[in-house]
Image (tube, rainbow, N blue to C red):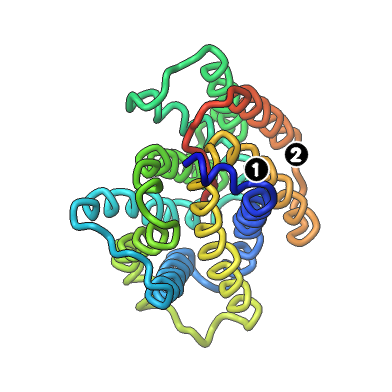
Amino acid sequence: MRDRERDSSWSVPLALAAAQAGFALFPIFGKLALVSIPPFVIAAIRVVSAAAMLEIVRRVSRAEPVRRADRRLLVVLAILGVSLNQLLFIAGLSLTSAINTTILISSIPAFTLTAAVLLGREALTGRALAGTILAGAGALVLLNAEKFDWGSRYFRGNLLILANSLSYSLYLVLARPLLARYRPLTFTSAIFRYGSLPIVAVSIPALARFSPTLPAAGAWWSLGAVIVFCTALPYFLNSWALARVSASRVATYVFLQPVIAATLAILVLGERPDWRTGAAAVLVFAGLAVSLRPSRRLPVGPIT
């Protein structure tokens, strides 16, 4: 790990910035694709296509095979980090705004800390607890929690995005040991290979009703961008970086994601943030700043 950490002058920061830019583009391209392609159809095509791309590259590069003893944990990680993560995210994005989505997924570091403490992987400090409370308060503000209106599509969408963040946080805490044993390409290819099966199974009804001739060309181009630039490349780049530098350093790049995505949501999608969005952003970013200040090796990374 020390040798890998020295390999971080330019390559690692560039990889992390590129990964966060890719993840930040998903709410934008995803919204454009959702205009004429159902959420679960997008999830199925996205994950299966990314899995196929990663597997082809893995075989060509002759990466090492997965050990039989690690397959059970990889299946669990695939369900948490790919299956549940992708389904909850695309379903939530279809109901809420791209700006709300980017703010809520920025709470992943705080949720990851909570999961790490509960699982005995990290010690709870006062600073970490304060950061978690701040970020959680921001999420509740954006959820409009004082009303808990299940009839509101924005409330349900925001809640799904939060569930996605929790699922991915568990994945990050449990994935750290395997990232030290396998090449990033081997690991990423395996979780997509195992994680695609549950998504396809859940999406069968939507796929059966879907006609490929209905979506406009722009929707297909947007979905193609989601597969390549918002899924396969960012997942690989983030895993590659996590194998070389501490997770706390990786976490600082999470701040790029909401900045890029919120700006594009305003410019491309015409979304307009309100006072609740601004207040939630301040609380979430304050919680992140407090949580990430210690140089701890927390397993923190991106979503979607």
Residue 91, position as x, y percentages in the image: 48, 55
Above or below for 221 versus 291? below
Above or below for 261 versus 144? below
Look at 44% across and 39% down and name the residue there. 169
Name the residue tied to disc 2.
Answer: 274
Identify residue type, mark 2: Asp
Q: Outermost residue toward the left?
A: 69
Toward which corner of the image does residue 14 lie, by quadrant? bottom right
Is 188 in front, or is 257?
188
Q: Marks 1/2: CA distance?
A: 25 Å
Residue 153, position as x, y percentages in the image: 54, 48
Describe the element under mark 2 as helix, strand or loop: loop
Q: Outermost residue toward the top?
A: 126
Q: How many marks overall?
A: 2
- Residue 289 numbered tag: none
- Residue 253 numbered tag: 1
Residue 104, position as x, y percentages in the image: 58, 40
Drawn side of residue 287 relative to residue 202, left or right: right
Look at 63% across and 22% down and name the residue there. 290
Q: Outermost residue toward the front?
A: 3
Toward which corner of the image does residue 291 lie, by quadrant? top right
| Sequence-first tag of 1 and 2 | 1
